Amino acid sequence: MTIDQTQRLLTLAGTLPFILAAVFYRQEVIAGYAIADIISVYAVAIISFVAGMQWQNASGQPRATALGVLAASNLLTLCAWVACLVAPATLAFVTYAACFAILLAIDIYVLKLPQTVAYFFKTRLMASSVVIFCLGLLLWQAARGLS
C-alpha cells in the first residue's frame, strides 16, 4: 500500500465515529458515556488535528498567507474547544460543522498557492463532506429532543 493510499484509508476511517454517532444517536449512551459527549470530544480532536495540518500547509507560503492560515486555524480550534466545554449539543454540532467547512475552505485557498500538495484535497473533500453531513444529522436529532 502506498503512502497516498494509506493516507486516504486512515482519513476516511476517521469518519467512522461520526457515522456511528449519527446512526446510534438514539441510544443516547454507550459504555456509560453520552454519545453527544463522545462525538464532541472526537470532533474537537479531529478539528485540532486538521488545524495542525494547516500549520504545515502555511510553512513555505508567503508571509501574509501564512499568518492568515495560522490565525484561522488557531481560532477554529479554540472555537471548537469552547463549544465542547460549554455549549449545548445543538450549538456544538453547528460549531463543529462550521469549523470543518472553514477548514475545507482554507484547503481550497491553500490549494491554489505554490508548494501545495493537491492529491490529498480530494480525500479531505470526501471526509469533510461525510463529517458535515453526519453533524447535520446529529444536529437534527438533538434538536428534535433525541439527546
Image (cartoon, rainbow, N blue to C red):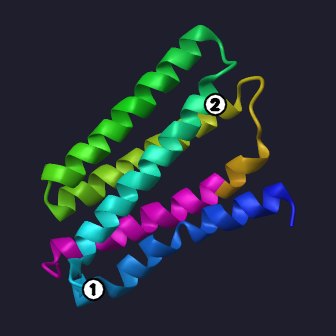
Asked if the magenta segment contains residue 145, the reply would be yes
> Percent x, y for residue 139?
27, 68
Inspect the image, locate mark 2, and give the three-letter code of the amino acid beneath it: Asn
| Magenta span of residues | 124-147
Badge 1 marks a residue whose secondary structure is loop
Q: Is residue 39 left or right of residue 112?
A: left
Q: Nearer the viewer, residue 131 or 73?
A: 73
Q: Quadrant of the C terminus?
A: bottom left
**First in residue order: circle 1 vs circle 2:** 1
**Looking at the picture, does residue 59 appear above or below residue 140?**
above
| Vertical relation: 101 (above or below) 106 | below
> Magenta segment: does it hold 39?
no
* Crowd tier of the residue under label 2, counting other residues whose Cα lies within 10 Å: few below 14, some 14–19, many 20 or above: many
Residue that badge 2 annotates: 57
Q: Residues within 10 Å of mark 1 (few under 14, many from 20)?
A: few
- What residue is at 36 percent from the left and 65 percent from the top? 135
Q: Amino acid at mark 1?
A: Ala
Q: Nearer the viewer, mark 1 or mark 2?
A: 1
Left or right relative to 25: residue 130: right
C-alpha distance separating marks 1 and 2:
38 Å
- Residue located at (63% from left, 31% from top): 57
Q: Are circles 1 and 2 on residues that touch, CB within 8 Å?
A: no
Which quarter of the figure has residue 60? Answer: top right
Tell me: residue 139, above or below residue 45: below
Q: Secondary structure at mark 2?
A: helix
- Is residue 120 found left or right of 134 in the rendered image? right
